[in-house]
Image: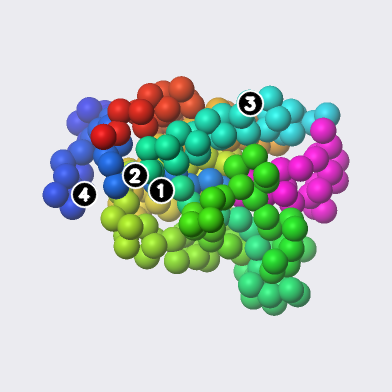
Amino acid sequence: MEEEYSANIGPLQVTRSTPFIAVRTAILTVDMQKEYCIPSRDPMHPELDENCYFHKQLINEVVPNQIKLVNRAREKNVEVLHTVIESLTLDGRDRSIDHKLSGMNVPKGSDGARLINEIDSEKDEIILPKTSSGVFNSTNIDYVLRNLDIRFLIIFGVVTDQCVDMAVRDAADRGYLVTMVSDASATISEERHQNALEAFSGYCRILRTNEVLDEINDIN
């Protein structure tokens, strides 16, 4: 089925296996922020300490892979964007109704909204604060990506079955050719992670870090 799929992207004829193209490729990291990626920081899930599956995955596999990906992208002048959960106000009055009902508020400018040190953005990288699961629903990311002439979007982050899932599906629906990096993403359990990959596999390519690094290396 993959080989039969094709789409027009500007002047390009592509399939899901089309290699990344210079100046039309970007990375998007999802919610790699201190509030959710440092053990015991998440006020909604205080049980997620350094001994839980989620944080062990982040420490042992996910964050090291993300470091490789963002560093290689920066070396190859591939655009790197980040989205984080962060309100536009201190009291979160601008949040989505879902975030209000869930009691989720990362105040504007708070430490919890900052990217973890390992992948902290360089001075000129774009960070998009959102107050919904879907970055395409509560930011101007689509406008930004189109201004950058991006059509190949590499997505990874946390958590696989919520905000990453939404980013993948919404990007695909808007005409981006999406690659999701499975071992640079995590959620609360291995079962949830695998179920998510299976559920949104029809919207993207799912590759591992080394495969994506190889393709980024080949960008001219």
Q: Nearer the viewer, mark 3 or mark 4?
A: 3
Q: Is residue 111 above or below residue 209?
A: below
Q: Residue at x 69, y 69 (%)?
A: 108
Q: Are marks 3 and 2 in contact (CB under 8 Å)?
A: no
Residue 146 placement: quadrant: bottom left
In the rendered image, residue 99, in percent from the top left (x then y), is placed at 68, 64
Instruction: Answer with left or right where residue 165 lies relative to residue 159.
Output: left
Give the residues in magenta: 31-50
SS at circle 3: helix
SS at circle 4: strand
Q: Residue at x 33, y 57 (%)?
A: 148
- Between the C-alphas of marks 3 and 1, the distance is 23 Å
- Between the C-alphas of marks 3 and 2, the distance is 24 Å
Q: Earlier in the sequence, mark 3 or mark 4?
A: 4
Q: Are marks 2 and 4 in contact (CB under 8 Å)?
A: no
Q: Nearer the viewer, mark 1 or mark 4?
A: 1
The 10 Å Cα crowd at callout 1, few under 14, some 14 to 19, many 20 or more, is many
Instruction: Answer with left or right where residue 175 lies relative to residue 4.
Output: right
In the rendered image, residue 208, in percent from the top left (x then y), is placed at 47, 25
Q: Which residue is mark 3?
A: 61
Q: Check disc 1 and give the amino acid type.
A: Glu
Q: Are marks 1 and 4 in contact (CB under 8 Å)?
A: no
Q: Which residue is mark 1?
A: 79
In the rendered image, residue 96, in percent from the top left (x then y), is placed at 62, 69
Does 43 appear in magenta? yes
SS at circle 2: strand
Quadrant housing the C terminus: top left
- Between the C-alphas of marks 1 and 4, the distance is 18 Å
Q: Which residue is mark 4?
A: 9
